[in-house]
Amino acid sequence: MITDSDRFSYQKSAYERPTFPYVCGRACAFGKPCSRGPNFDGSCGGTTECSPFQNGDRWECRRPPSAGGPCQDGPLPDGTCCQSHPPCKPRPSMRRRRQQISWLMAAFVVSVIAAFLHFTPDSFVGEKAALSSILPGALSGAHSNFALEEKGCQACHENHGKGVVAWANALVTNQSVGESCVDCHSFGGPTMSPHNATFTAAAGAAFSLNSANADTKTDCVMCHTEHKGEAANIATMKDAQCNSCHTTSIKAFGKDHPAFGDRYPHDRRPAIAFDHVSHFAKHFPEKLAAGETRGCVDCHQIEKAGLTVPPGSFEQNCSACHLGGIVDRKLAILNVPYMEEDPFNRDTVAEFCAPTPEEVELLREAANSGELEELEPDEYFYEDNGDNLPAALALALGVAADDPDGYLDAIGTLYPELAETGVDSLMSRLEAVPGKHDIPAMLAGLDGELLRQAACAWMQKVEYESPSEVQGGGWSSDGLSVMYQPNGHADPVARAWFDFAINAERDAIAAEADDLVVEQAAALGGLLTSDSGLGNCTKCHAVTEVTDKGGDQGDTAKGLLVEWGYQPVNDRPYVKYDHKPHVNLLGPGTLCATCHKQNPEAAFAASYKQHDATNFAPGFLPVAQETCSQCHTEGKVKQDCQLCHEYHLEPGFNRTMGFQHQAQSVKETGREGG
Amino acid sequence: MRSLHRALIFFWLLAIGGFAFVSWNAWQTWLHNGEPAIVTGYTLAGIFVFLALFNVRKRLAMIPLGRGAYWTAAHGVAGAFAIAVFFVHTNGVFWPDGAYEQLFAVLFYLVSISGILGYWLQRILPKRLTDNGMEIIWERIPHELAEIREKAEGLVEEAADKAASDTLAQYYVETLAWFFRRPRFMFSHFFGAQSGRAWIRREFTAMRRYVDETEEGYLRQLEDLAQIKNRLDFAYSVNGFLKIWLLFHVPLAVGIFLVMIWHIILVHVYLL
């Protein structure tokens, strides 16, 4: 017993075997266990007290001393033990039970994985997708619908659903999940480069990068980890990550952020040459009634405040003063040219043109009197009424506008053609001019009858008399010329002439045209961009030299562009800003000047005399970093890098609504067919 | 004992150093827009393998693989290390979104809780067993109980013969047989209460009034046996809990090991 200090003697105690898979059933019921214990297979080993041993011809009892030693009766003659007991039901040992439960757990886990493996995420949409045993979590809201409904998991994981071999292959090969992102997402530079840009030493001068990091190949999944739930933000980035690459480490915006540039926030001039200083200091006081004032929000639409606070339309803000300056600037394309001799064949003129009123009167008188007299036209008509050719016509004919001998033959050919065919002969000559022109737009609304009658009148040496007086703008004639007058702001014909003429000289040079053509092209461009040019468009719309990346010549193809319409200047693609909360914070229209202070010293208007948009003097003093850090500083408003900076360059989408529509159509067709 | 203490300090330093390195590495990887979960994940997998080796070590007692006490200490420290690395790996997310990752998390938390519970049991229960003053193999306790019961019943029979009275026999049949039949007051013993001892004192004090001098001698011997049985019950209870917690811990660990393998496969097939 336990009180016996010698109880573990081999003569008193059976050997305990804790690792044995079964224990005696009697012991489990807290009865006296037999000395032999259960067998390894779980059967009772104690139905007899020993297994007798045959020693020669005698059977000897083998009961161990701990169980009382050899019994008095000894084995039976057949060699069996004389002490038999009913068998017990051995039970698994603790270790055995642990093993059994472990196997059960393993079976459970494998079963659960296998069961839910059958339900691939493709089978589910939304919340149910999370049940799949291969899905670590639901996709974010932005990706959940199209990814699962269109391509399923293969939208990003190309080996999904391709069988065991593809799985095994994928297990040992690198995956390229991030590459599929660009199926939908687009950027303004290399996808797999930091900030979608190729950095140079010059680019990093002010805010340099470690060269090693700048060259690092990035991957979308480095930062954007999916399957974190529908509401997860997968585009988070911390300041520390920015600082790990940028050598100019910024602990706090207010302390060590580099100063803003001298012209912050813009490095290029606006598309519209609106001089705030002169308007506020001079024009508004002159034009407005006494006591009337103009503030920022009278022109800028704060309800649309975002990166910029866009101004209202021309009609809302400018037309009251500037409309007259547009519609009174005309462009002549035909006229009575100065000529010292008549280049026209009378018979041809008579063939194409009806008799003039004078000729009709003369014929009537002849009929009455019986005598036919010849009408003598004005011999000095072209010398008395003629003028230099219009620049547009000179360019179309490829002659000098002020050289009557030079253009005599060309006029002698053109005008009869005009009398015969109307617009077509003019169009064909304009089309022959090198350059990008939209002739139908340039001559839109031009009535061939007007051309025909004007040409006839002039060939018959009389002024053209318009049958009715033209109201408003459009094509018209004053008797000695045919001209175009804009109907108002944003006139499409005027715009087409500008778009053609602004690059006409460069295009002519590029086409190796005759010097005379180049000169006339330059003259036309000069005329249009002058103060007396058609519509006076370039008084406000900047003419800017741009690179036509889409052109045949790649990045080297430069051209001039008339910047039609207001375009928000976004020359800092990595900077983002939202005016709206600031406007609301400061008070609408009252405190814009907190940040935007006019600079009367700047030669703002002068910068529009040339074509380099970056060479300009802003009409406002630069917004200083200190202005922002008054609020965006420790203990006040947050100052995270990503509050004002974008990581990606010009992020956008490759997919279009058309694609969606197409996909939807396919699906619907499938439904109907299936 | 001192060497074990030194080993424990060494293991903790190793774990803290390892954790500091893994955390630093994860931080640096994250800073440079890398995927820190790769390093932390494989570190965690390595820790799981090491933790599983403890079970193998127990089965391979014949091979000199270091003292079991060292392994136990290292197992506990590695478990704590695993919990810390787990949360670095999940980036502090306690409850994941996907079903199989939720299964992974549940298993991990249960393994961790059972591990912490087991560690706590192993820290406090052996000391209480020592205080009990009775050293015995847990598997042998039923045998000892049977012997005590046999002896008690022998005493009762002898008392009936000597005193020519069945008072003690009736008392045994009605009251003490229940106590000697099997271990009693298991939870009371585990939580350190003295229900068993109180029961013995109450029952034997009550009985003492009804026995004569001859029977009282036997009653004292029976009380001594009851006290011994009560201590055996304590050993059975406490030692039993030291074994029973493994019925949870080990199977859960097996489960988490399988889910971990599945997780690694998925990560390689779908991401890396």
Image: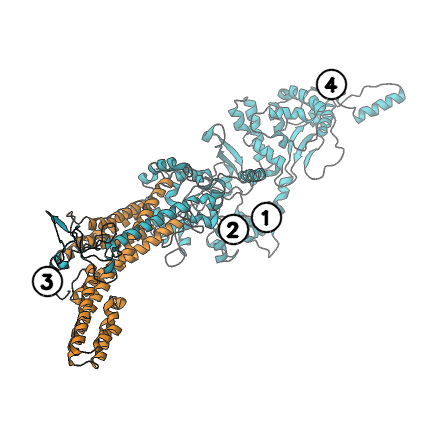
Chain colours: A cyan, B orange
- How far apart are the two marked residues, 1 and 4, measured between alpha carbons? 54 Å
- Where residue A317 is drawn, which disc sits there? 1
- How far apart are the two marked residues, 2 and 1, measured between alpha carbons? 17 Å
Q: Chain of mark 1?
A: A
Farthest front residue?
A77
Q: SS at mark 3?
A: loop
Residue B85 position, x and y percent, is: 29, 51
Q: SS at mark 1?
A: helix
Residue A53 position, x and y percent, is: 13, 50
Q: Chain of mark 3?
A: A
Marks 1 and 3 close (CB-CB < 8 Å): no
Is residue A318 among what the camera can see? yes
Foreground disc of the pair 2, 1: 2
- How far apart are the two marked residues, 3 and 2, measured between alpha carbons? 95 Å
Foreground disc of the pair 1, 3: 3
Q: Quadrant of the N terminus of chain A?
A: bottom left
Q: N-terminal of the two: label 2 or label 1?
A: 2
Q: SS at mark 4?
A: helix
Q: Is residue A648 left or right of residue A247?
A: right
The residue pinned by badge 3 equals A6
The type of residue carrying mark 1 is: Asn
- Where residue A399 is drawn, which disc sits there? none
The residue pinned by badge 2 equals A305
Q: SS at mark 2?
A: loop
- Of residue B239 and residue A373, the one placed in the foreground of this image is B239
Foreground disc of the pair 3, 2: 3
Q: N-terminal of the two: label 1 or label 4?
A: 1
